[in-house]
Image (cartoon, grey):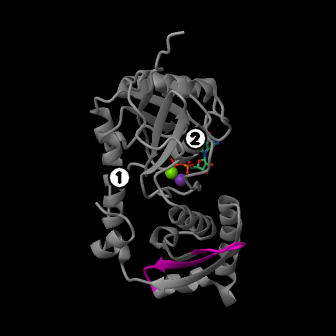
Amino acid sequence: FKKYSMSHKAGFVSIIGKPNVGKSTLMNALVGEKLSIITPKAQTTRHRILGIVNEENYQIVFSDTPGIIKPRYGLQDSMMNFVKGALSDADLLLFVTDVNEQHDENDVLEKIINSTIPMIVLINKIDGATQEQVDEKQAYWQELLKPMHIYAISALHKYNLEGILEKVLEYLPEHPAYYDKEELTDKNQRFFVSEIIREKIFNNYQKEIPYSTEVVITSFKEEEKITRISAEIIVERDSQKNILIGKGGSMLKKVGTEARKDIERFLDQKVFLETFVKVLPDWRSKKNYLKSFGYEN
Ligand code: GDP
Ligand code: K
Ligand code: MG
């Protein structure tokens, strides 16, 4: 037999859309791993997070991104720069929208409307929607974005996702793998540990607390039977520190316990987690703090 080298496809696929439409849920479903944290609150995702699907003859590099908004402070500027990056180097865009979303304020989508990158629109959360609703949204997005394809899906229930990977592959070029074929993401364990803690904070506190919080892993020691982790939870004001800690430390304890359980699942090892709360006034608007927390641009 003559041996033919099999062709290999690889490329970047950016998952974009407004806050809370289900971008992170979709990426986790497509990659088959919980990489991105998911909460009912907008602006949960602050970074561009890669999720890589590897097969023998292809590598799809998905980017989960923060929801598109008009930035109001330094942290949000940086979040929108991550989106800009994901828009500029993609081979394909997956634009996710919530079937229940209203058609107003679509001016923030200007960059997407004007983008020349091939696009697939995913109308998400169709569980609970009527066929009329779906049809109406389909017509609306077809007209506004003129995408290659539109799918009606439920990322949460993994409904109608089967065809997406195959369709995505049609738009990827012949290219060698960009990342090692064993890699699932570009972020390290510390990043995901800090994200898990942030998820618990988003789920346990209301109003501005989640948005004013950053989590920094200050120590990460892998021992034979246990991983010892120290984390700093950073807030902007003393009053927020008090709320975060709660009566007799009860709230912080709850967050710590919930986070530890998830981290143990994620690392597949016993974990000792200690948390400290620290006040850094106005960190979300200060360049040096943002930079030290990984919001480079
Ligand atoms: P993101 O901000 O765009 O990344 O959205 P998330 O993935 O964080 O999801 C926001 C909220 O929508 C979460 O509460 C999800 O559980 C929920 N969600 C995501 N996909 C679906 C879906 O298909 N159906 C329903 N009903 N809820 C969903
Ligand atoms: K969210
Ligand atoms: Mg998200």
Residue 206: image location, x then y, percent: 57, 69
Q: Is mark 1 on a helix, strand or loop?
A: helix
Would the CB of label 1 be found within 8 Å of ligand 3?
no
Closer to us: 105 or 289: 289
**In this rendering, position of residue 55 left or right of residue 120:** right
Compute the Cα span from label 1 to label 2.
20 Å
| Range shown magenta | 221-237
Closer to us: 115 or 32: 32
Give the residue displayed 34% in from the left and 75% down from the top.
Answer: 289
Residue 112: image location, x then y, percent: 33, 36
Q: Which of marks 1 and 2 is in front?
A: 2
Task: Give the residue number, with chain letter if any, for mark 2.
Answer: 31
Q: What element carries label 2?
A: helix
Residue 255 position by quadrant: bottom right
Give the residue displayed 32% in from the left and 59% down from the top.
Answer: 78
Residue 116: image location, x then y, percent: 28, 29
Tell me if residue 251 is in the magenta stretch: no
Residue 21, can we see it? no
Which three-letter amino acid code belongs to the residue tagged 2?
Val
Task: Give the residue number, with chain letter if any, for mark 1.
Answer: 82
Residue 183: image location, x then y, percent: 52, 47
- Quadrant in the picture for the C terminus: bottom left
